[in-house]
Amino acid sequence: MTTDMTTDAISRLQAAMERGAAARPKAGGFPYLAESLRQAGVTHCRMAVPANVFLYLTEHGDVVVQGEPLVTGFAAAPQFDRTALIDALRADQAGETAFPEFVRGCWNAGIIWYDVDTSAHTCTYYGANGESYAEDYPSVTLP
């Protein structure tokens, strides 16, 4: 059941994603998307990597966005590989990969989920056995 509040949360999220995509440079673009989300009231963005599903926690209601799953049925969870994760992050930050490739790189590096805290400007990546790696991202001003 969709209420006015959830419709508002969805439309605000969609508008923020469009604004962030428009402002995003090819290299180093993630902070622009994150800032657009923050300004729209998104406090956290949580991604379940193998399912390719996002949970956006917002001031206007929480929104789930389902992408194409990386895994269906049974699959072994890859081992956490910090070096491979950092390689995937740096390639994405340099504009060398598109988002689907970045997500696949996270999965291959053993990332099961990640959490973006838009207030703290951090993104924390988690492995299946409690391993984690966190990075700060810079504050930016949207045009």
Image (cartoon, rainbow, N blue to C red):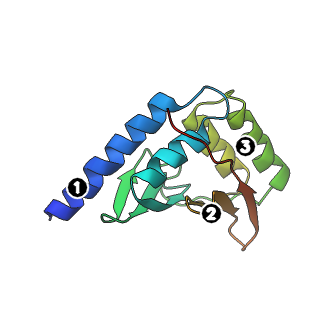
128 to 78, vertically: above or below: below
Q: Where the N terminus falls, by quadrant?
A: bottom left
Q: Along the horizontal axis of the image, is 26 left or right of 87?
A: left
What's the CA distance linking mark 3 and mark 1? 32 Å
What's the CA distance linking mark 2 and mark 3? 19 Å
Q: Are marks 1 and 2 in contact (CB under 8 Å)?
A: no
Q: Earlier in the sequence, mark 1 or mark 2?
A: 1
Characterize the local packing of mark 3: few (<14), some (14-19) or many (20 or more) Cα atoms within 10 angstroms: some
Mark 1: secondary structure: helix
Q: Position of residue 65 (x, y in %)?
A: 37, 52
Q: Are marks 3 and 1 in contact (CB under 8 Å)?
A: no
Q: Give, as a three-letter code, the residue at label 2.
A: Ala
25 to 129, vertically: above or below: above
Residue shown at 46% from the left, 45% from the top: 36
Which residue was labeled with disc 2? Answer: 120
Q: Give, as a three-letter code, the residue at label 1.
A: Asp
Q: Nearer the viewer, mark 2 or mark 3?
A: 2
Which residue was labeled with disc 3? Answer: 89
Q: Position of residue 67 (x, y in %)?
A: 42, 46
Q: Along the horizontal axis of the image, is 128 left or right of 72?
A: right
Q: Position of residue 66 (x, y in %)?
A: 38, 51
Q: Position of residue 91 (x, y in %)?
A: 73, 34
